[in-house]
Amino acid sequence: MNPEFVRSSDIDRVKWDRSVELHGRGSIENYSWYLDAVCDSWNAVIAGDYEYIFPVATKHKGPVDIAYQPFFTRNFEITGPGEPDQALIDPFLKAVPTSFKEIAIGLPYFPELSLKGFKTSHYPYQVLDLLPDSQQLFSDFTGNTKRNINKLAQSGTTYRPVTTTQVVELFARETAGKIGTMRAADLERLQRLLDSCLAHRAGVPSAARVSYWPMPSLY
């Protein structure tokens, strides 16, 4: 298998999204419309007839081209019928052209894999598998979490529609200022992303109301 670097204009979006739908394990971050919303521009490394795919977000840093991890994405992963192994990840990373003088990207953590020639850092986070039904998910929660969920269910909580603009305004007011590298253009990307999620039936903007206190969120 020889992965090849493919420029954005040459990517078959239909085949790309079909691969994500088949092998993306429920994640929406690799869909072409999601990448369009959050990236300055993006290219890809592709093996076979879109058997394995990997997005490469790119932008200019002065005169230099860099590959980077955009805001509103945690990481990008090599999407395909099997879990990536060392024999797959090495040629995929080597396929990124040397014209990119900086590569700063996030990858899912597989402790058995090594990234040769790269400096790595690990950032732990929690992932909730949403494939089991709601009763199975609930049964696996801790006792304290179950009590908190039951309290919320008994509190008269209701949900009401809000606009994506209201969600962005809340994020700008409460969170964006705590991220030193976030700029107005990133908030515009968030607005574009939320609108794209609604257009592709991948999100519902709603506000939870407990008594008089509204708590906007995106589901």
Image (cartoon, rainbow, N blue to C red):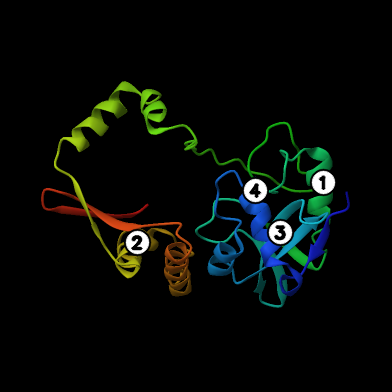
Q: Which mark is residue 90?
A: 1
Q: Is residue 136 above or below residue 69?
A: above
Q: Which residue is mark 3?
A: 103
Q: Which of pointers 2 and 3 indicates the residue nearer the eye?
A: 2
Q: Is residue 147 left or right of residue 19?
A: left
Q: Is residue 92 above or below residue 191?
A: above
Mark 2, other Cα within 10 Å: few <14 / some 14–19 / many ≥20: some
Q: Secondary structure at mark 4?
A: helix
Q: Is residue 38 left or right of residue 14?
A: left
Q: Which residue is mark 2?
A: 171
Q: CA distance from mark 2 to mark 4?
A: 32 Å
Direction left: furthest residue: 212
Q: CA distance from mark 1 to mark 4?
A: 23 Å
Q: Which of pointers 1 and 3 indicates the residue nearer the eye?
A: 1
The answer to the question of whether label 1 and label 4 lie on touching residues, with beta carbons closer than 8 A, is no
Q: Which of pointers 2 and 4 indicates the residue nearer the eye?
A: 4
* Residue 94 screen position, x and y as percent: 83, 54
Q: CA distance from mark 1 to mark 2?
A: 38 Å
Q: Earlier in the sequence, mark 3 or mark 4?
A: 4
Q: Which residue is mark 4?
A: 22
Mark 2 belongs to which amino acid?
Answer: Phe
